[in-house]
């Protein structure tokens, strides 16, 4: 007799449990849950999974073997960025967010979680000061989601569909934005010139159907946009808004896009006290002025000061809660699910610890080491800068005239203990420098670069 398979670690595989669940929802089979999924998108067979390991010790050994396949790279030899960055994380950040009263992704439940509300209010306030804007949301999933939501907000604010992208955006972020905005927006990409926006070409495309001009500074390639004001003026003249993506780690020395006319600023807080853990801990921020037209289009939770029944006392709680999908459910303008609130608290601790002077010193360090690394690497035979823009933390090397392609160079440097960057294609390498990379580390990278190129000279 063949017995039905019951997985040792998945209780609902037991036939009686599965049937009870189906009975509870009134379904005849699991297939009913997938009725809306086209047949050509379904696998049509069971997943090809290994037999389960019944003994716990065998499972522990198996997982341990998988984990041992990972190779760690010394922080000073890691020059890989492309959206997740190896910035230093002060020990106090991990200490605070591992406390039991904070250790959850959720933002807190009304009427009972005022300590978490206060911590996130402080995060919002610190971010607002850094971005020079009034209102900042409780972090959403990640920076990609923040970008998509910021642009969706622009379509609702203006009642238009057109989005004009003028920067080199991260391809994964661009993919997210395309998917998210497909029902409500049309995206036009203006190719950059020498790494930055082609203002004249962008201006020619901005018109009565434009909801937003989207600029990324720094861009995916690390280029700093120098024409944000001109782009904002062109957008505003057409009745559109300027939506700017940025990384807050540089705003101790760089002006916020808001200072040059950006209406909505978005980005990721991973660089602010969050580890790069196997792809990173990420949280997206969206920031606007204290303007009802913009604030009421923000779908994320906002925490603010609230008065109590006792004169002189105040607490912390949701602001304009009725604009969220939590309050109005399917009538919400945009759905928001699980927050990345814990990362907001981490970023708040980081910013409070660094302070204005610490952020300025960090920004100076990042700018100077980026320039030093770019100069050191482009001094090598066959290695050139891909553009003439000013760069922050990342830059692209053109290897068209080098003795190795970008993937070959990455492989050669990995054999020497370095993670030299991301190969964008055969001829371009994206290199990242953080405060974890000292001048000596950069010199070591340049020496390893030179040795690899010399050994493979054609």
Image (cartoon, rainbow, N blue to C red):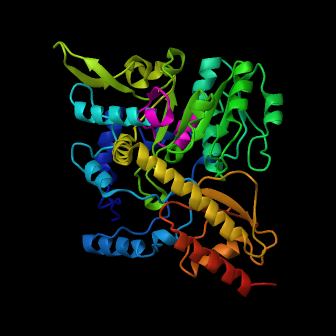
Name the residue at 51% across, 40% down: 34
Q: Quadrant of the N terminus?
A: bottom left
Determine if the magenta segment contains residue 137: yes
- Magenta stretch? 129-149
One can see residue 14 in this view: no
Determine if the magenta segment contains residue 139: yes
Rendered location of residue 299, percent (x, y): 47, 26
Q: Residue furthest left?
A: 310
Q: Quadrant of the C terminus?
A: bottom right
Relative to 23, does residue 85 appear above or below in the rendering?
Answer: below
One can see residue 57 in this view: yes
Would you say 25 lies left or right of 234 here?
left
Residue 164: image quadrant is: top right
Foreground residue among 348 and 147: 348
Would you say 194 lies left or right of 120 here?
right
Rendered location of residue 293, percent (x, y): 54, 16
Would you say 147 lies left or right of 429 here?
left
């Amino acid at each position: 007799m063949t017995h039905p398979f019951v997985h040792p670690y998945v209780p609902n595989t037991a036939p009686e449990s599965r049937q009870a669940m189906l009975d509870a929802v009134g379904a005849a089979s699991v297939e009913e849950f997938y009725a809306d999924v086209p047949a050509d998108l379904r696998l049509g067979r069971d997943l090809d999974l290994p037999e389960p390991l019944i003994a716990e010790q065998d499972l522990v050994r198996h997982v341990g073997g998988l984990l041992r396949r990972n190779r760690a790279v010394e922080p000073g030899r890691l020059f890989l960025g492309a959206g997740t960055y190896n910035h230093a994380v002060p020990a106090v950040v991990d200490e605070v967010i591992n406390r039991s009263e904070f250790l959850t992704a959720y933002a807190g439940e009304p009427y009972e979680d005022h300590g978490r509300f206060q911590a996130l209010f402080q995060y919002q306030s610190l971010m607002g000061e850094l971005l020079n804007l009034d209102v900042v949301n409780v972090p959403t999933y990640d920076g990609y989601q923040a970008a998509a939501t910021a642009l969706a907000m622009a379509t609702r604010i203006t009642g238009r569909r057109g989005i004009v992208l003028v920067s080199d955006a991260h391809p994964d972020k661009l993919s997210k934005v395309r998917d998210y905005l497909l029902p409500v927006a049309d995206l036009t990409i203006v190719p950059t010139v020498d790494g930055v926006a082609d203002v004249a070409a962008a201006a020619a495309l901005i018109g009565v159907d434009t909801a937003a001009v989207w600029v990324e500074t720094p861009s995916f390639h690390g280029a700093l946009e120098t024409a944000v004001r001109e782009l904002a003026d062109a957008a505003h003249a057409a009745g559109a808004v300027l939506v700017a993506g940025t990384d807050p780690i540089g705003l101790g020395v760089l002006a916020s896009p808001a200072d040059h006319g950006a209406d909505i600023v978005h980005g990721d807080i991973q660089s602010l006290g969050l580890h790069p853990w196997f792809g990173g801990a990420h949280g997206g921020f969206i920031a606007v002025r204290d303007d009802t037209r913009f604030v009421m289009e923000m779908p994320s939770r906002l925490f603010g000061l609230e008065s109590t029944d006792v004169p002189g006392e105040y607490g912390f709680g949701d602001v304009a809660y009725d604009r969220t999908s939590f309050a109005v459910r399917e009538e919400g303008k945009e759905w928001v699910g699980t927050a990345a609130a814990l990362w907001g608290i981490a970023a708040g601790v980081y910013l409070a610890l660094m302070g204005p002077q610490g952020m300025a010193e960090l920004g100076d360090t990042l700018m100077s080491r980026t320039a030093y690394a770019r100069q050191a690497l482009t001094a090598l035979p066959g290695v050139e800068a891909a553009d003439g823009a000013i760069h922050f933390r990342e830059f692209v090397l053109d290897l068209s005239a080098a003795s190795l392609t970008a993937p070959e160079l990455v492989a050669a440097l990995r054999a020497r203990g370095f993670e030299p960057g991301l190969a964008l294609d055969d001829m371009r390498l994206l290199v990242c420098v953080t405060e974890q990379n000292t001048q000596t580390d950069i010199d070591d990278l340049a020496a390893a670069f030179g040795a690899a190129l010399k050994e493979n000279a054609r």
